[in-house]
Amino acid sequence: MTNDAKGKGGWPLFEVFIRSKQGLSHVHAGSLHAADAKMAIENARDVYTRRNEGTSIWVVPSDAISASAPEDKGTLFDPADSKIYRHPTFYTVPDDVECL
Amino acid sequence: MVHEASAPDERAEQFDAWVADENKVEPQDWMPEGYAKTLVRQISQHAHSEIIGMQPEGNWITRAPSLRRKAILLAKVQDEAGHGLYLYSAAETLNVSRDQMEADLMSGKAKYSSIFNYPTLTWADVGAIGWLVDGAAIVNQIPLCRCSYGPYARAMIRVCKEESFHQRQGFELMMALSQGTPEQKAMAQDALNRWWWPAVQMFGPPDHDSPHSAQSMAWKIKRFSNDDLRQKFIDMAVKQAQALHIEIPDPDLKFNEETGHWDTGEINWDEFWAVVKGHGPCSRERMANRRKAHNDGAWVREAATAFAAKERARAEKVAA
Amino acid sequence: MSKVDPLFETCLRLGDTALVLGQRLAEWSSKAPTVELDIALSNHALDMIGQAQLFLEYAGRVEGKGRDEDALAYHRQDFEFRNAMIAELPKGDFACTMVRQLLFATYASMFYERMTASTDADLAAIAGKAEKEMAYHARHAGEWVVRLGDGTEESHQRAQDAVNLLWPYAHELFQTDVVDQAMIETGVLPDAAAFKGEWLGEIEAVLKRATLSLPEDDWMPSGGRSGQHTEHLAYLLAEMQVLPRAYPDAKW
Ligand SMILES: [Fe+2]
Ligand SMILES: [Fe+2]
């Protein structure tokens, strides 16, 4: 987020992360404005979990997030492309051996 | 994606190729100014429509004729507020603040869907809106889930998921009326008479009169032309009206064996443009209500801002 | 009111209070100070209407005359309504709505928490659902009352005015009559008087953080729970009931 993330007479923007089920990671759901973190959680509950989507909410001030630069995408992520041995499908095993 | 370092016209070319290839554009990626401008206009207009769109149906919340209907309607109108918020946040990724967008709505600079400038005169209008207006919105919005701009596409996926019950509750409501007493049937027919043409006009002016469409299609912001979407909606709605045993108010409506589609009579585009210009029956009231809610709430927003500042100051004092 | 069935009467009191408060909260739709609050207030209204449906549906079963929740909600007169008066007062400004939510929801969460142990299985089940909803309303309203009270000069004044206006009506929630006594004796209802001190403690704690104060206890209006209402209820019902009354044969 490159803007100064202010709105509503200076209410900062928060990014909302929701854990949908016990045991899963928090996933980015969207963003919202709030005067403080408590209000951000209240708002997130009403805006992003009206249909039982959540068991836990994180809110993070948007300007506290550092993001990788788009032009670094190649440098950061391409090296992983060649390490296919990290994926289980890299390995050939006989069809009739179970539980692999 | 486009490299910041590329020469300007090369960048535009790379961008066009990138989206033509069905890739997504994210907020930090380079994008042509026109692309960002088109998106801000479209997304904020869309957000405003969700917010203003709460009013016509909201008009009946306190008078819903059963507790079940009251809960459904409240939840539906509440969803529209949520849609407005998802869309405002999507637009904010393009460096336009929510305050600015709201100010543009209230000053009349920004537009919203004309359909919400028609009055809801009876309870059947709540059904007609859910069935036809949300029905048309879904036809419009499903392709937007594949829009090239990531945040808009993701917001639309969320919206479309929630939208599915809106149309169904409207149709069910109309069904109850059309199977009800003679007065209820008449109410349903009257609502269809008043909402049919505005709903057909929701897809925007005919293709030959829609100057920005071609560029939006090339940028994969728009996937189908106004007229194609409109036809899709009409074909769908005709069958649904038959199931409701109510009549679409168009004496020229007939099935075209050759095309396999329903042809309609002349659409009154003069009325459409008049409403777009702010001359709809409820245009002024909708805007006045929006401004009043905003102004009446100013002291609450100021209080929360002041309280947050005090809390920060207190926390700093403790830390010091 | 010749022979009153205390259980039927109790269900009406619980259901009507939830319904009337839900109707008032629903009035905020598209009028709230922020879109986020619009969504929150609709959520609260939906909780209240949901509770009303459950209580009134059960009331109909207890009565055994074939009336369902809609018959009870839409085809009774104002003097047949049994809601506490605090629920029917106009929604007022946002401070009024939040102070009412704080006073009522703090009470209701304590009441339903105890009612989960009711000897009446239906009421215990409804309480189990309502308890959590009311605890959330109380928390949400508490945070806002603090923000308003300790916000700006204007918001402080409005919040204090709201406290002064609503405080007298809170007492009715804790009063008991023969109907309540019968229900308390059989373990159907908890005795609200028993937790009034705890309730007062919570309210005072929030008001203190909000830099607000309670007015003197003098006037303590009551009567809503036996059908004697303020002037406001009849208007609320006239609006709410207009369609079923205009078309008595219609199904919606
Ligand atoms: Fe919507
Ligand atoms: Fe909708």
Image (cartoon, coloured by chain):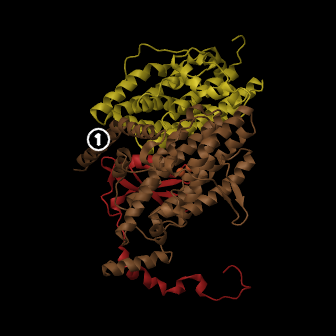
Residue B168 falls left or right of residue C215: right
Instruction: Say if B124 sits above or below B16 in the image.
Output: above
Rendered residue at 61%/36% (across/down): B70
Residue labelled with disc 1:
B306
Residue B22: x, y in percent?
A: 51, 75
Within 10 Å of disc 1 (Cα), the crowding (few <14, some 14-19, many 20+) is some
Q: Nearer the viewer, residue B84 or C89?
A: B84
Element carrying mark 1: helix
View extreme (left): residue: B320
Chain coloured red:
A
Task: Name the outermost residue toward the right.
Answer: C65
Residue closer to the observer: B121 or C244? B121
State left or right for residue B174 relative to residue B154. right
Toward the viewer: B73 or C8? Answer: B73
Q: Count the marks: how many?
A: 1
Label the yellow chain with its letter: C
Task: Give the chain ID for the brown colour.
Answer: B
| Chain at numbered mark 1 | B
Residue B3 vertical placement versus B244 (above, below): below
| Residue C143: x %, y % from top left | 40, 39
Q: In which quarter of the image is residue B308?
A: top left
Q: Position of residue B10 (x, y in %)?
A: 35, 81
